[in-house]
Image (tube, grey):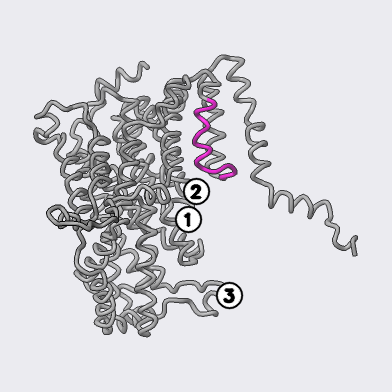
Amino acid sequence: MADDEKLSPAKSMRSCCKFHWRGKLTVLVPLITLPILIYGFRSNRPELKCIYLIVNMAIFWITECVPLYITSLFPIIFLPLFGILSSETTCSLFFTNALVMFVGGLILALAIEYSNLHHRIALGTILLVGCSPRRLLFGLTVVTCFLSMWMSNSACTAMMCPIVKAILNEMEAQKIFTIYMTQEEEPVEEGEQRHPSKIAMAFYFSTAYASSIGGIGTLIGTGTNLTFKGIYETRFPDAKEKINFPIFMAYTIPIAVVANILLLYLSIQLTHMALFRPNSKTGQEIKSATSNKDILYGVIKDNYKALGRMSCHEIQVASVFTLMVLLLFTGNPGFMMGWSDALHLDDVKSSSIVFLAVVILFALPTQYTFFKYCCGSAPFTGRAMDACLSWTFIHNNMPWGLCFLIGGGFALAEGSKVSGMAKMLGQSMAFIESTPRDVVIGVTIVIAIACTTFSSNMAVCNILTPVFCEMALAVKIHPLLLTLPSTLAMSFAYLLPVSTPPNAIVCGYANIKTKYMAVAGILPTLLGIVLLWINAVTWGAVIFPDTKDFPDWAKEARLF
């Protein structure tokens, strides 16, 4: 009996590797790449020391053998240890203006969630657009895209998934269309969650992809935007083209967001909702569901009515948020004099405005019933008034690890610049200098999407953006043309759950298999590549007209 239970050496090794691969990888990877570090020290080449750090961090980020956010803290240890940056300089990069702005944006997104304003916006938009399956999908796609411009992609997707599920469950309850695959289509074991049907997957995929598209609409929409801003402005402090809130939106909204979201909707209609195929099985289901749209409209209307009148809490959050957006837009819009120019407050950056809104929300009460006690007589209420924002709620729901991830990227970018590593890698691409500029832009977009498909987009942004900065200098192309489109592309990885947080959330929430996402994401990914390229070479030239030529400040930057 004991002999039967004893594992063979081969099985024992497989079992050990299966359950303890992370520990082994954390030891083997640094040892395998150790010759790079040894050669760097022996030849006194700091760029090789930095390559050693980046290679290890990249592998750790991709495999997650160490938690993603802990890997992001490696620069604090190794950049000073390798003599590349001081500890004080490295640590200061974990709390830059761009990072503080990102933290403020996350807090404001949580303020919207805390007030329940997001549900009112979502249900109100759906009622406005209509409740046939095609219109409903359009409404959910548009509202997800809009909310994701101001909230983190993860929070927006996590918020919309229960709304989508509630709508789909109502569809099934009213026998409008099936929302799960049959046992023949996708077998499941007893007790396992059933797999969503093709139509149901259309709603979940649209939610995830629209969240990613909306995230590129504003600087605070997703972490990669602010990572790019921080790395670009650190590498090119003398750049004439400033990446501020209104200019960034002017660049991204018309084509990269609006046109993209419309084409996403059409692509999902084609692949999952039988557009132009009315006689197919799915087409017949959609036709039947459209005839029963009044039932769903009544359900959503009842849910909207259940929210009641807009509360004082919601009104205040909406007002403060609107005020913040106006201040961000009018501070230094670029096409006219802003309030920061008029008041000579050039040192007041976006982070100050965002945190002004945060502080106001912590100060304002959710309601003003206490006024009736001001002129009244005792007894007075002994209950404290709640603020529009709760620190306990922020503390429990804030993704603090993202701050480490972005800060680690800034430190890594500065280390690669100071050590000369980014310049070395960029100059190695000098052979494409004779290649047409528009082709090089397309290549960087494809590289960004390809890399992001298999790893976190934040990690990829931290690694590729400094390299593209130096590559632009080597091939004498305006750095903005290679860095900004590629940064936006890092949000357009639709093929795998690991590519972006929204992908992972919908696959986990709805029990969607990877093979279905891989097929669904092909057309949106191709459309995203084309639109980003068109945006960069056409509309981008309108927003940044000086990017046609290699600027003088970039020529000076080549010397450093």
Type of the residue with mark 1: Leu
Q: Are marks 3 and 2 in contact (CB under 8 Å)?
A: no
Task: Say which residue appears at 54% left-offset and 23% top-offset.
Answer: 48
Q: Is residue 120 above or below residue 32?
A: below
The residue that disc 3 covers is 191
Q: Position of residue 114 (x, y in %)?
A: 32, 56
In the image, residue 169 sits, relative to residue 107, either above or below, namely below
Nearest to N terminus: mark 2 or mark 1:
2
Residues under numbered marks 1 and 3 in contact, where contact means CB atoms less than 8 Å apart? no
State the residue position of label 1: 496
| Earlier sequence position, callout 3 versus callout 2 | 3
Quarter occupied by the N terminus? bottom right
The rendered magenta stretch, by its main secondary structure, is classed as: helix
How crowded pointer 3 is (Cα within 10 Å; few <14, some 14-19, many 20+) is rated as: few
Evaluate if marks 2 and 1 touch, with contact meaning CB atoms under 8 Å apart.
yes
Q: Secondary structure at mark 3?
A: loop
Would you say residue 72 sits in the magenta stretch? yes
Q: Is residue 240 left or right of residue 81?
A: left
Which residues are drawn in magenta? Answer: 64-78
Residue position for label 2? 454
SS at mark 1?
A: loop
Q: At 38% from the left edge and 51% from the top edge, which residue is drawn?
A: 393
Circle 2 residues within 10 Å: few <14, some 14–19, many ≥20: some
Cα distance, mark 1 to mark 3? 26 Å
Q: Helix, strand, or loop for circle 2?
A: loop
